[in-house]
Amino acid sequence: MPHIELQDLIDANDQPFVVIDREYRIVAANQRYGEAYGVTPGAIVGRHCYAVSHHASRPCHENGEQCPHQALFDHGEAVEVLHTHFHAGDQPERTRIRGHALRGVNGERYLGEQLFPLEASVGTDCDAMQMVGQSPAFLACVDNLARVADSEASILLYGESGVGKDLAARFIHARSTRAGGPFIVINCAAVPETLFESELFGHERGAFSGSSGLKKGLFELADGGTLFLDEVAEIPLGLQAKLLRVLETGEFRRVGGTHTLNADVRLVSATNRRLLDEVDEKRFRLDLYYRLAGIDVTLPALRERREDLPALAAFLLQRLAGSRRACRLDAAALATLQAYEFPGNVRELRNLLQRAVLTCQDGVIRAADLHLPVAALPQQPGAGTQPLAEIERSHIRALLDAHAGHRSRVAAALGITERTLYRKLKRYGLS
C-alpha cells in the first residue's frame, strides 16, 4: 500500500475538511478549513473542535445537538448533520457536516469532518443574518433550499403568509448558477388581470390604449436569471395557458407584437394555498401545476420553530432601531411572544415589534407594549387547546374590532394583502 501524507490528502478536498481524535482535538485541517475560520491550519491543530467551530467550552452534544463525534466514537456511526458554526468575528453560518470514519496506521480511529457551508457566496442581499434561525426545522429547510438551488428545475415554495418565501427565493437564486443574472419579482396578487399579460411579456407601442412606447416584460428582463412568481395561485385562469406555453417553449411575443422572442429563465414560484385544491376547484390548471412544481419546498411556520424567536426578535429590533440603540424585550414579553401562535408568522412579528418600539418606555418592551389582541392571547394551563384555525379566526376578529372594521389596516397588521384577508374573512364567516 502506498504511503500518502494525510495533509496532502485533505488538502486535495475542495470543501473544508478537518480530522479529529477521540479527545475532540483537531489533528489536521486543510487550507479551506483554515480560511473558513480566519486562521492557518497550523494554528488550529491541537485545539478542541467545538472551541474552533462553535466558540463553545464543551462538546456540542452536551448542548443538545446531534454530534458526529459522539455518533462515531460512541456508536460507530458516520452521520451527516446540520449545525450553526461561528466563523471569524462570531459570524454565524449554517453548515452541513458529513462525518467520515478514518483509521490511523496503528488502527486508532479518527473522525473526518467534511463541511458544506449552506450560505457560501450568497451575498449581502441574502446573508445569514437575514435568515435567522438555528432550530432543527429551520436548519433542515435551509439545507433543502441549498440542495434544490443547484438544480435548474422550477421550484414551488409552500408556506403560510409571512414565513419568508421571498427571502427563500432570493436564497435559491444566490446559490444557483444564475446568481450573476437578474432576480425579477412579480406579486401575482397585486397585478390587475387586464395588465397581467403585459407585465409578464411586455407590449409594443400602440398595443392598447395608453401604451405610448415599447415595454419589456418581466420574462424578457429575467433572461439568464430567475423570475419569482409570488402568490402564483392568483394568476388569472385565462392567462395560465399562455404562461404554460412560454414555460414549455421559452418563446413569447410582446402584446401587440409579431416577433417571437426567447428567454432563458429559471422559475421560482410561491403560494400559501394548496395548488392541487385550486386544481380541483377549476381555478388552476393541472398541467401548469406540474410545470411549476418541478421541486416543491415547504417553509416552516414560526410556531414550528419557536426556539428561533429570541434571536429573530433581537435581529428585527436591531433592524428597526437603525442607527439608534435597539430596544429589548423583557422576560415576560418574550414569554408572551413564545406562547403566541403567530398566524401572520415573521411578518406579523415584525409589525408587532415595530409598534412596540414606538410605545415602550426606557427602551424596554413589556408584554403590554405588544398589543396582542385579547382573543388571541394564549390560554391559561388547563383551559384546553384551540385549533389553529379558531385561533386565527379569533385573532382576525379582534383586529377587526380594534381597527373598527378597516380592512386595509387589519391586512397591514397581519402582514398580508387585502385580497388574502378577504379570503380569510370569507373562510371564517367574518365578512
Image (spheres, rainbow, N blue to C red):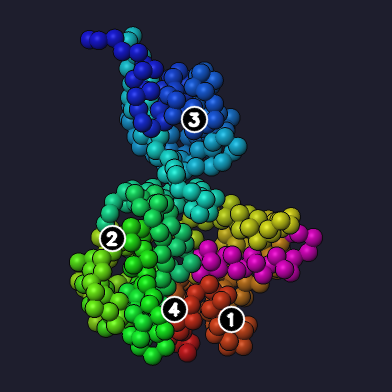
Identity of the amino acid at label 3? Glu
- In front: label 4 or label 1: 4
Check disc 3 and report its element: helix, strand or loop: helix
Nearer-N-terminus badge (2/1): 2
Check disc 1 and report its element: helix, strand or loop: helix
Check disc 2 and report its element: helix, strand or loop: loop
Density class for disc 2 (Cα within 10 Å; few <14, some 14-19, many ≥20) is some
Nearer-N-terminus badge (4/2): 4
Real-space CA distance between mark 2 and mark 3, rounded to the nearest whole angstrom: 36 Å
Tag 2–tag 3 contact (CB < 8 Å): no
Q: Which one is in front, 227 or 370? A: 227
Instruction: Please provide percent x and percent y for residue 6.
Output: 36, 16
Identity of the amino acid at label 2? Asp
Picture quadrant of residue 98: top left
Q: Is residue 150 visible?
A: yes
Nearer-N-terminus badge (3/4): 3
Real-space CA distance between mark 4 and mark 2, rounded to the nearest whole angstrom: 25 Å
Nearer-N-terminus badge (4/1): 4
Tag 4–tag 1 contact (CB < 8 Å): no
Return the mark for residue 35: 3
Disc 2: which residue: 264
